[in-house]
């Protein structure tokens, strides 16, 4: 089994180099990363049983990768500045959301005026400081890149979590309009619309959230917000169905079946909603089927 897994990992490495070459990108970074990991494990390798590893031995993996990577015509090819900036912004977003404020400040000190550094500090500011200062920083990011949907998303998220859902709607709507894959932003936009408790916005919220869960059918948050929207519309059948779908997406099959059973009683028998509720109510996990 381990031999099979090691072979699969080797094939994955070869596929990675193949894909990088096909897209005109260098595999040098991949090679250097694996080499660094191998160096870190150099001392431990003395005590590793090579026959009990699910991955190839680090030194063997680097040796196999080096020949393939250096054979690529793009070995010395540098990423474009635009691609590098996108990568740096993603890293900054992760650091901003996952690390403490002091860690973000050390990694991105005020002396660093690059766009990724400002992005990370703006995220940390909204998470740990008062909203006004954070919003000023986010607005400066939007001025720098007015077509970046994720800066508008951040502004909407900051306003929403500051208890200002009505103000969050406009930036989130704009973010959803210009984002290439807007499903997750649409879920947040739907959440903001629902949170305004403005009945005149519920139809829009339902439409947006329905489109979002069609694209992201495994999103519990999308179904939860859809359930709240239907609840405010007093459409209890669809509210129950969306709640059951949210529970199912969370992996809580027991709750999903219970709520779906109730939803069935609210729909006309044989209607599309009844059929969906019946599917959830009668669902049995594969393990249960084996036991039976």
Image (tube, rainbow, N blue to C red):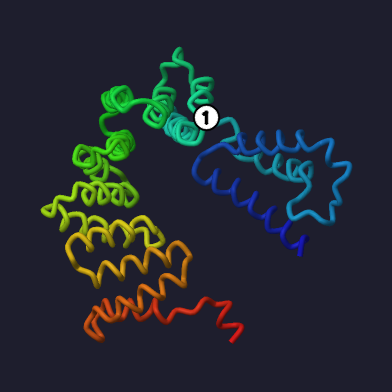
Question: Relative to the observer, which residue lies in front, 99 or 212?
Answer: 99
Question: Relative to the observer, which residue lies in front, 110 or 59?
Answer: 110
Q: Is residue 186 left or right of residue 67?
A: left
Residue located farthest toward the left when viewing the structure as drawn? 200
Quarter of the picture containing the N terminus is bottom right
Q: How many marks?
A: 1
Residue 125 on image: x %, y %? 39, 26
Quarter of the picture containing the C terminus is bottom right
Q: Residue at x 47, y 34 (%)?
A: 87
The local secondary structure at tag 1 comes to loop
Q: Residue at x 53, y 22 (%)?
A: 107
Does residue 215 lie above or below 76 as drawn? below
Quadrant of res 138? top left
Question: Relative to the observer, which residue lies in front, 58 or 255?
Answer: 255
Q: Is residue 227 left or right of residue 291?
A: left
Quadrant of res 256? bottom left
In this figure, which residue is indicated by the disc labeled 1? 78
Does residue 104 lie above or below 65 as drawn? above
Q: Residue at x 60, y 52 (%)?
A: 15
Residue 178 on image: x %, y %? 26, 42
Q: Residue at x 69, y 39 (%)?
A: 34
Crowd rating for badge 1 (residues with CA inside 10 Å; few <14, some 14–19, many 20+): few
Residue located farthest toward the top when viewing the structure as drawn? 111
Does residue 61 lie above or below 252 as drawn? above
Q: Is residue 236 left or right of residue 33?
A: left
Residue 93 on image: x %, y %? 44, 34
């Amino acid at each position: 089994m381990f031999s099979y897994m090691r072979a699969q990992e080797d094939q994955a490495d070869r596929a990675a180099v193949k894909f990088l070459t096909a897209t005109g990108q260098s595999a040098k970074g991949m090679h250097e990363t694996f080499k660094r990991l191998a160096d870190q494990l150099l001392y431990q390798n003395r005590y590793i049983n090579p026959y009990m590893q699910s991955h190839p031995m680090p030194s063997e993996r680097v040796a196999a990768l080096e020949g393939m990577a250096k054979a690529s015509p793009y070995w010395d090819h540098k990423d474009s500045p635009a691609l590098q900036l996108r990568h740096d912004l993603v890293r900054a977003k992760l650091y901003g959301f996952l690390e403490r404020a002091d860690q973000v400040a050390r990694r991105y000190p005020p002396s660093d005026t690059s766009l990724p550094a400002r992005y990370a500090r703006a995220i940390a500011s909204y998470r740990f400081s008062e909203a006004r200062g954070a919003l000023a920083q986010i607005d400066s990011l939007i001025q720098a890149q007015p077509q970046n949907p994720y800066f508008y998303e951040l502004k909407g998220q900051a306003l929403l979590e500051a208890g200002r859902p009505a103000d969050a709607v406009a930036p989130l709507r704009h973010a959803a309009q210009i984002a290439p894959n807007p499903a997750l932003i649409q879920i947040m936009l739907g959440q903001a619309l629902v949170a305004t408790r403005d009945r005149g916005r519920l139809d829009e919220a339902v439409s947006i959230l329905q489109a979002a869960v069609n694209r992201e059918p495994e999103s519990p948050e999308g179904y939860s917000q859809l359930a709240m929207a239907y609840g405010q519309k007093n459409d209890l059948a669809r509210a129950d169905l969306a709640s059951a779908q949210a529970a199912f997406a969370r992996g809580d099959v027991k709750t999903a079946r219970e709520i779906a059973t109730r939803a069935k009683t609210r729909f006309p028998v044989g209607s599309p909603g009844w059929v969906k509720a019946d599917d959830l109510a009668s669902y049995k996990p594969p393990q249960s089927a084996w036991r039976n």
